[in-house]
Image: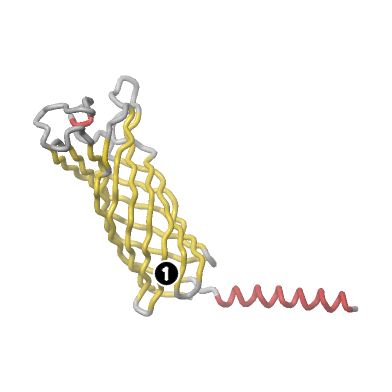
Amino acid sequence: MIKKLIYTALLGIIFFSGSYAQQSFTQEVSIGGSFGMGFASVGFTPKVKQNMLQTYHGGITGRWISEKNVGLQLEVNFNQQGWNEEFDDPSYYYKRTINYLEIPFLTHIYVGNRRVRFVMNLGPKVGYEFSESTSENLNGEAPLPNTMTVQRDSGIQQKFDWGLCGGPGLEVRTGIGNFVLEGRYYYALGNIYNIRRGDDFAKASNQQILVKLTYLTKLFSW
């Protein structure tokens, strides 16, 4: 009899907890904007010696929290990538900035309470290069250690860019909206130059570390 009572009580607690969890969870749809700073490079094979290139990022963010601790996030961003070559003589510089319109499709994961949450956004990203610019003072020279110059000789050959991105963040939820400070890493699976047999590079893929601040306001919840 005691065992039956214990089992019944446990089942009741489990049922009540499950019902409470379902009732306490609220789906929500939010929209907002973001701005951030990045540090970019290009993974060249053969290697081109580089420092990180400082870049900028901004865009529109939409988020749907569809399940407890999980949601979907879609962004449309302006994002700069590129590379900054390193030379033995610091008076030389060569920087290529590549401007992309990009769309990340992200899984949003969170843990925490109603005010503070630790978040993780990760997923694929596609982008299209619409402009580029060069800043340099080489005047046709090839100073050491970067005697390889073919990466400077033409514009970007592959405008479509794609890869994987993700990283952790901290979200603070207030009465005037939600603020998310987030770090991300992007690794491109595509290349900015042709990599067919006989081409100059076997690999030329974007990489980027990004820190961004996003503001979100809730449109509706249910």
The image quarter containing residue 206 is: top left
Residue lying furthest left: 139
Please state the horizontal and vertical placement of residue 25, each as a whole percent of the image: 54, 73
Residue lying furthest top: 198
Tell me the residue at 44%/51% (across/down).
123
Please state the horizontal and vertical placement of residue 86, each as a whole percent of the image: 23, 36
* Side of 122 where 201 appears, left or right: left
Tell me the residue at 32%/63% (across/down).
213
Please state the horizontal and vertical placement of residue 99, each as a whole percent of the image: 23, 47
* Side of 144 where 176 appears, left or right: right
Please state the horizontal and vertical placement of residue 103, each as a whole percent of the image: 34, 52
Q: Is residue 126 above or below residue 4?
A: above
Specify few, some or many for label 1: CA neighbours under 10 Å numbering under 14, 14-19, or 20 or more.
some
Q: Quadrant of the N terminus?
A: bottom right
Question: Which residue carries the number 1 mark?
Answer: 29
Residue lying furthest right: 1
Q: Is residue 3 above or below residue 170?
A: below
* Depth order, front residue of 162/208: 208
Give the SS element for disc 1: strand
* Side of 209 where 90 appears, left or right: left
Tell me the residue at 37%/47% (across/down).
186
Report the coloring of the rendering.
Answer: secondary structure
* Depth order, front residue of 20/221: 20
Q: Is residue 212 above or below residue 81?
A: below
* Side of 74 where 88 appears, left or right: left
Q: How many marks?
A: 1
Residue lying furthest front: 89
Q: Which amino acid lies under the numbered mark 1 shown in the image of this protein? A: Val
